[in-house]
Every structure is written in structure tokens, then in C-alpha cells.
Image (tube, rainbow, N blue to C red):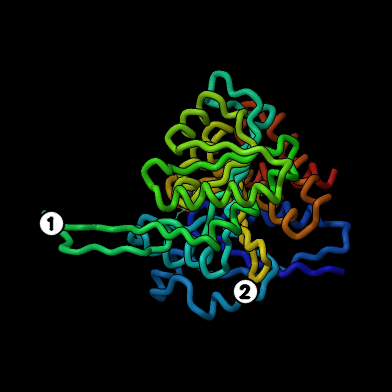
Amino acid sequence: TRSIKLAVIPGDGIGIEVVEQGLRVLEAAVAGTDVRIDPTTFDLGAARWHRTGETLTDGDLEAIRGHDAILLGAIGDPSVPSGVLERGLLLKLRFSLDQYVNLRPAKLYQGVTSPLANPGNIDFVVVREGTEGPYVGNGGAIRVGTPHEVANEVSVNTAFGVERVVRDAFSRAAARERKHLTLVHKHNVLVNAGHLWRRTVERVNAEFPDVTTDYLHVDAATIFLTTNPSRFDVIVTDNLFGDILTDQAAAIVGGIGLAASANINADRTAPSMFEPVHGSAPDIAGTGKADPTATVASVKLLLDHLGLVDEAARVEAAIAADLAERGDRVRSTTEVGSDLVARLNG
Ligand code: IPM
Ligand code: MN
């Protein structure tokens, strides 16, 4: 028997509801195999912060480190000042656990309506760098609140950090049918970082001669995501561009309710974390309206990461069938979960 130690962080708002369904589907996916899920729930998020003033303590982090993977719902609440939980909890997890590959697939499933008139066959993945860029918090402000205020957010790009994520993106591209990698940046303006990314892609390409590459400035990439998204196979980009592009990517394949993500430590020196791209949606929290599909699709990525590829494929098939047949039916969070579980049991 293989026991998977899973750290579960439901977090805030609808995170709690969707994670519950994600766990049900995960259990159903491994039922009848020799894999056992051993979950530990971590009380992290707005409620804990209000109660104790803590976001993520060293103790929490050490406990989480002892797990094989992390399933996270959503972090954030309007009652907490902006940035406190984002920086102190979510980004702290990604950075401390060195989750440098933020993987975000965008696939238009049958039965799902794209807002694009002619979406074509959309099936690409974005490899967003996860531990550098403007997200590192390297900056500061002086003369705050005066007309002479200066506010800096410095984007950090290291040769080490860029190379490891570019290599991961190449290996993902090499394993796909089209074997195409698009670097997205803005090297006509961000000349220092942009050229480091461009040189790195050129150099690492030598290790993956089957992979073709091209380059787009980020502004042009947003145009193609709207006018011709089927041109993309694998996109590699920095942390902030990737944040923005993956929301657009989610929108063109049916919205944020379906968008999965993985924060991967590809060297496996710490657990990777799987989370829906959407937030805590306080406006619909507790109403049972949240679609758990993004979380279930993140569970699929979790299974892949753990090498449980058959189980992952079955979850993927259940999601695809559910989407193909859902039509205009309105179901609660639990009902969608139950339908997916039934497909896995059936
Ligand atoms: C995401 C979110 C986060 C990010 C926020 C909540 C810090 O938007 O996961 O895309 O910017 O990475
Ligand atoms: Mn985002």
C-alpha cells in the first residue's frame, strides 16, 4: 500500500466547498487501488488571521513540508487588508516550497462555450515562473502619500531561476504532439530581463532539438489569445505576465470556474501545491453555487505529479464527460462533485 500524505488547505470562502468535492473525487479516483490518501487539514486563511494574527508560521510550514502534496482551495477575504494573506500565505507557500513551475493548462472542452466566435481547437499550457519576477517583493516606497512619492517594485530574474523554468517548459513541449514553445516577454522595453529570457530559451533549445520556438511580446500575445488561440502549445513566461495571461487563457476556455493550476517544485525538494486559479469568491461563498471543476482538474494534475497517471486520466475523462453533458443544467457544488464521483465509480 502506498500512502499519500496530503496537506489540505481549504482556505477561505468557496475554497472550503470546492476542496471538499476535490477530496471526494480524489478518494474515488484511487478507490480499489493500493493507494491510500492520508489527509491533514491546515487551518490557514482569513479566520486564522482574525483569531491569532498569524498567516503562515514556521511551524505550519515545517508541518506542510512533511507531506507529499498540497491541495489548496482559495485564499483571501475582503475583511483582511489586501496583500496580507496573498503575500503572507499564498506566495509564502509558493516561494518557501520553491514551487517554480506554475503550470496552468487551457483546453476548450467539448460542451463548453468559449466567448470567442471562432475559438478553434484551444489546447495549450502556460508555464508561468513561480518564484521570481515582481512577485519577490523587492522594492519600496519613499515619501509615501506626498506628491513626490516614489514606489518601486523590482522584477528579479536570475539565470538559475529562468533556466530551470525554461528547461521544464521545453521538456513539457517535447512530450506534447506539436512540440512548440512560445516565449512571452517584453524585451523591447524590459531589456535586461527580456534578453536573459531570450538567450536562455535559445541555449536550452539545443537540448530539445525537436521543439520549435517563437517569441511574442506580451501585448501581442493577448491579441493572439483572442484572435488565434489555437496557435499556442506551450507558453513560457515570467510570474506577472503569466498571472495576467492565465486569467485571459481561462476566460477563453469557459472561465475561471474551470481553470486548474499546479505549483510544482520540479526538483521535488518540497511538496508541490495544486489549486484552482479562481479566488475565494466571497459573494457566492456558502450558497453552493461554486463550480468545483477547477479544483477537480487540479486534483488531476496532482495525480499526474504523483505518477498516478491512470487515475489522472480517469479523472480527466470524468471531467470531459461531465462538461460534454452538462448543457444548461444548474447544479450545486456538491451535485457536481457527486456526478463526478459517480462517473469514477461507474
Ligand atoms: C493567482 C492569483 C495570485 C497571483 C494572487 C492571489 C497573489 O492571482 O494565483 O493567479 O497573483 O499569483
Ligand atoms: Mn492570478
The image shows residue 257, relative to residue 70, as above or below, that is above
The three-letter amino acid code for the residue at tag 1 is His
Tell me residue 231's x, y (percent). 61, 29
Q: Secondary structure at mark 1?
A: loop
The residue at label 2 has a CB less than 8 Å from ligand 1: no
Residue positioned 52% across, 51% down in the render: 14
Q: Could you classify mark 1 by the number of other residues whose Cα lies within 10 Å: few (under 14), some (14-19), or many (20 or more)?
A: few
Q: Quadrant of residue 325?
A: top right
Left or right of 250 on screen, residue 283: left
The three-letter amino acid code for the residue at tag 2 is Arg
Numbered badge on residue 329: none
Cα–Cα gap, marks 2 and 1? 44 Å
Instruction: Examine the rendering and report whether any part of residue 286 can be seen.
Output: no
Split into 4 quadrants, where in the image is the N terminus?
Answer: bottom right
Residue positioned 83% across, 68% down in the render: 2
Residue positioned 63% across, 43% down in the render: 293
Tell me residue 270's x, y (percent). 64, 70
Residue positioned 46% across, 58% down in the render: 157
Looking at this view, name the residue that lies furthest to the left: 147
Query: Disc 1 marks which residue?
Result: 148
Looking at this view, name the residue that lies furthest to the top: 117
Left or right of 264 on screen, residue 321: right
Query: Disc 2 marks which residue?
Result: 65
Instruction: Examine the rendering and report whether any part of residue 241 can be seen.
Output: yes
The image shows residue 160, relative to residue 343, as above or below, that is below
Residue in the foreground of this view, choosing between 45 and 207? 207
